[in-house]
Amino acid sequence: MASLLCGRHGLGQVCRSRSQATPFVKTQNVQSSRASIIVRVTQQSPDTRTVVTKNTPGELPLPWSEKDPYKLPLSIEKVQRMLFSLGWEKPWIEQIVDRIMKGMLRTTEERARGVIDYLVSVGLKQDEICNMASISVVLLGLNPETRLKTVVAYLKGRGVPDSGIPDLVLKHPRIFEYRVTEDGKSLKKGKARIQVDVVPVGTNGETAAAVNYFREGASFLEAPVSPVGPVL
């Protein structure tokens, strides 16, 4: 009886006599039920190496780095190094990096440094700026010229002295997310409004800045439950 050649189970059975046997050249794909990793090989240009991206079924490759998902993109790494050089604590820096990764904060090293340098010139310390940035998600991505300076100019125009600005913005860190209204009387963000008034306190001629939050079209003192409005 002629000997038989039997192919491996899973690659298709081939049972023929030795004289009729032919090379098995066509390979079929084998998918094991134990496989938990999908490997995709992307062929790049000849002068670069092939990138192998591994991801579990149903997941997409990390968009910021296919070569090394644990390495930060250079632009974000620059922001990270800059914040470390200024003495910011690691947990707060990681929070900033996480926001950039998730698209919640759009900034660069130059923009973030511009924001920090301007706030320092106003009179804030590094730990105070760090505290503000942890509350105001977009602070380090704002344009210092068109967003920060205009708000500070508004505060000065409402009578807030230079010495009082650091304390006011520290207590209201999201104030820079607002823009000055056309009439220059308040700050706006959508329908939300902020109006700052310097009012007298005590009997010695002392003053304090009152920060009023309200919505566009709000009514004041027109009903028993209406609040006292900002100074007109």
Image (cartoon, rainbow, N blue to C red):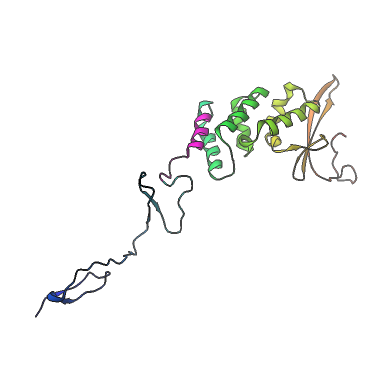
**In the rendered image, the vertical position of residue 87 relative to residue 39, given as above or below:** above
Q: Nearer the viewer, residue 67 or 126?
A: 67
- Residue 71 colored magenta? yes
- Considering every residue shown, the one lying at the far front of the view is 46
Say left or right for 134 vs 151: left
Say left or right for 49 vs 182: left
Count of marks placed on residues = 0
Which percent across, then down, holds residue 41?
Answer: 37, 53
Which percent across, then down, holds residue 9?
Answer: 25, 70
Q: Residue at x 48, y 48 (%)?
A: 63
Q: Nearer the viewer, residue 146 or 70?
A: 146
Say left or right for 78 vs 54: right
**In the rendered image, the vertical position of residue 74 relative to residue 56, given as above or below:** above
- Residue 82 colored magenta? yes
Which percent across, then down, holds residue 211?
Answer: 77, 34
Q: Residue at x 49, y 31 (%)?
A: 81
**In the rendered image, the vertical position of residue 75 relative to residue 205, given as above or below:** below
- Considering every residue shown, the one lying at the far left of the view is 1
Quarter where residue 102 is shown:
top right
Quadrant (top left, top right, bottom left, bottom right) of the N terminus = bottom left
Q: Nearer the viewer, residue 215 or 79?
A: 79
Question: Which residue range is magenta in the image?
Answer: 67-83
Say left or right for 175 vs 97: right
- Considering every residue shown, the one lying at the far right of the view is 222
Q: Nearer the viewer, residue 194 or 189?
A: 189
